[in-house]
Image: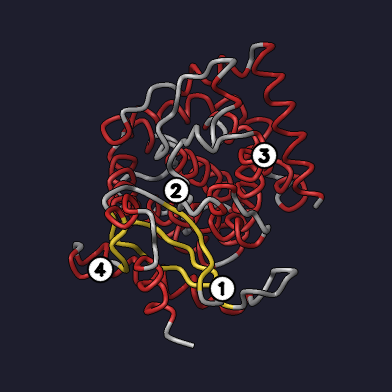
Amino acid sequence: MDDPEISFHRYFRTLTNPEHRAIYRGKADLDVLEPDLSSLLLKVQQSYNSALKERGSVFERGACSDFHLDYVDATIASAFSFEYEGRAFLALSIPLIAAMWRSAGQLCQSKSVMSYFQDGTGVDLRNVHAIFFLAQISFLVSHEFAHHDRGHFSSRSRAGDLDNDLEANHKFGSMAEQAKEIDADGWAVMLNVDNWFDRAGRGSFLHAFGQERAESHQADNQLLVCLVMSVCAALLLWQPMELTEANVYELSHPPQAARMERILLTIDMWARNSRPWIAMDATQHIFPDLISAVEDALAPVTGAHNWEQQVNFLRTSAGQQYMHALIEQSESIRRQ
C-alpha cells in the first residue's frame, strides 16, 4: 500500500466534479505558511496520526484499518472526512487553518475573553494563542474522526460530493444529517475532555495560562472555560444563520446555539461522573456572557452576530419542537 500522504494527494485527482477539482488541489505544502504555524501543524499531524494508528479499525464491516490526518490545498475553508484506498482520511484545508489561527489570535487579544482567566496577566500570549488554536483544531479533528468512528455516511457522499463540514448546505439538509452532526459533536467532546483534563493537553494549558501553581479544582474550572470558548470559536467558523421555523429543518448542520446546548450537556454529564467539583451548575449563568465575548472577539473574522437570535428562536415553541425532534433523531442514531 502506498504512503498515506501519496494516497491522500491522489484522491483529489479522482474527483469528477469540475467545481471540486478547482477548489481542492491536493496535499498542501506547509512550508508556505509562517514557521510557527507550520511547525505546530506538523506536531498536530504527527500526534494525531500516531494516536489514530493505535486506534485501528472501528468499522463493523472492517473496510478501513488506517486513519490519516492531512491538510489540503484549497480555495475555501473546509473540513471533511472520506475513505479511499483502504484508509479513513481526515482533511482540513489551509484556509480553514488560517481562519482558526486568526481566530485564536483574536481570542487571546480580547480583554473580555482573557478576563475569565485568573492569574492570567503577564502570560506569554504566543503560548495562549497556540492553546486556543490547538483546542479548536482538536475539536474539529475529533469531530471528523467521529464521523468515521460512528459510521456516518452522508447522502452527499453517496451523490459524489465532498462533505464540507463548514458549509450549511440546504440541498442536502435534513434532520437525519443534523443528527449525525450532533452525534459527532458528542463523541468529539468526550475525546477532548479526556485529552485536556487527563492527558498532555492539561500541562500545555497550565503552562500557557500561568496556572502551574493553581489548585487542582481551580485549574479544572479555568480549563473548562478555555475548552468551552474554543469549541464556540470553532463553531463560529460556520456562518451562524438567522433561524426561522421553515429553514431550521433544512440545514445540513444544526444551528450553533443548538450544538453548543448539547455540547454543554455532554460536558455536564462527564463532569458529574469524573469531575464533580467542576461547578457546572454554578457557572451556567456565565456561559451566555462568555459566548458573547467570543462572538464579539471573532466578529472581525466571522462577521457573526446571530447567536442571540438563534438562542431566542430555540426558546420559542417552534424552537423547542425543533430541539425535541433533533434530540429524538440523535438518540436514534446513537443507539444504532
Secondary element at image label 3 = helix
Secondary element at image label 2 = loop
Judging by the rendered image, the residue that carries numbered circle 1 is: 52
Q: Which of 38 and 278 is in front in this view?
A: 38
- Decide: is 196 above or below 293: below
The mark that comes first in sequence, 1 or 3, is 1
Identify which residue is drawn at 56% across, 77% down. 86
Are the two marked residues, 3 and 2, in contact with CB atoms closer than 8 angstroms? no
Q: Distance between the residues labelled 2 and 4?
A: 21 Å
- Decide: is 64 above or below 290: below
Horizontal and vertical percent for residue 288? 52, 25
Q: Which amino acid does label 1 sit on?
A: Leu
Q: Which color scheme does this rendered protein use?
A: secondary structure
Are the two marked residues, 2 and 4, in contact with CB atoms closer than 8 angstroms? no
Instruction: Name the mark on residue 164.
Output: 2
- Decide: is 196 above or below 113: below
Judging by the rendered image, the residue that carries numbered circle 4 is: 30
Q: Nearer the viewer, residue 321 or 220?
A: 321
Task: Look at discs 1 and 3 and give the one toward the viewer.
Answer: 3
